[in-house]
Image: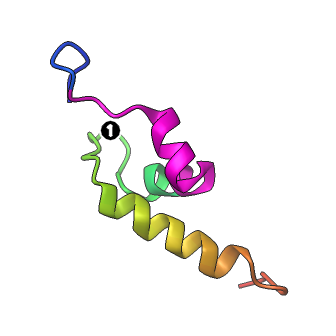
């Protein structure tokens, strides 16, 4: 992705669509230290689904 080519992802758009928790979870689990991250909308959707499933439980201890 490149800002000069106009194919970058706006983080505000991702947060508005899926929420900040989904964005944070996708970034933290989607790459290893020192490696580039390939952005995929499917990964953000999966992170949102995971956060919704485990983040809204009455007893959220895992």
> Whole-percent x and y of residue 48?
52, 66
Q: Residue furthest left?
A: 5
Residue 49 belongs to the span the image colors magenta: no
Residue 36 image offset from top left, x and y in percent: 26, 39
Indicate the position of residue 47 as horizontal and vertical percent values. Answer: 48, 65
Looking at the image, residue 24 sits to the left or right of residue 59; the answer is left
Name which residue lies at 55% across and 44% down: 15
* Image: magenta residue range: 7-24
**Which quadrant is the C terminus positioned in?**
bottom right
**Residue drawn at x 60%, y 70% as measured from the top left:** 51
Name the residue carrying label 1: 34
Dividing the picture into quadrants, the one containing residue 6 is top left
**Left or right side of 45 for 58:** right
Above or below, comparing residue 21 to residue 56 in the picture: above
Point out the image quarter for the N terminus. top left
Camera-nearest residue between 59 and 45: 45
Q: Is residue 30 left or right of residue 18?
A: left
Q: Residue at x 55, y 50 (%)?
A: 24
Instruction: Please give the count of numbered marks on the rendered protein.
Output: 1
The prevailing secondary structure element of the residues shown in magenta is helix
Q: Position of residue 12 (x, y in %)?
A: 52, 34
- Please say if 3 is above or below 42: above
Residue in the foreground of this view, choosing between 30 and 12? 12
Residue 22's quadrant in the figure?
Answer: bottom right
């Amino acid at each position: 992705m490149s800002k000069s080519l106009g194919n970058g992802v706006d983080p505000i758009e991702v947060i508005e669509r899926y929420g900040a928790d989904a964005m944070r979870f996708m970034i933290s689990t989607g790459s290893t230290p020192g490696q580039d991250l390939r952005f995929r909308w499917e990964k953000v959707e999966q992170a949102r689904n995971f956060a919704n499933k485990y983040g809204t439980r009455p007893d959220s201890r895992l």
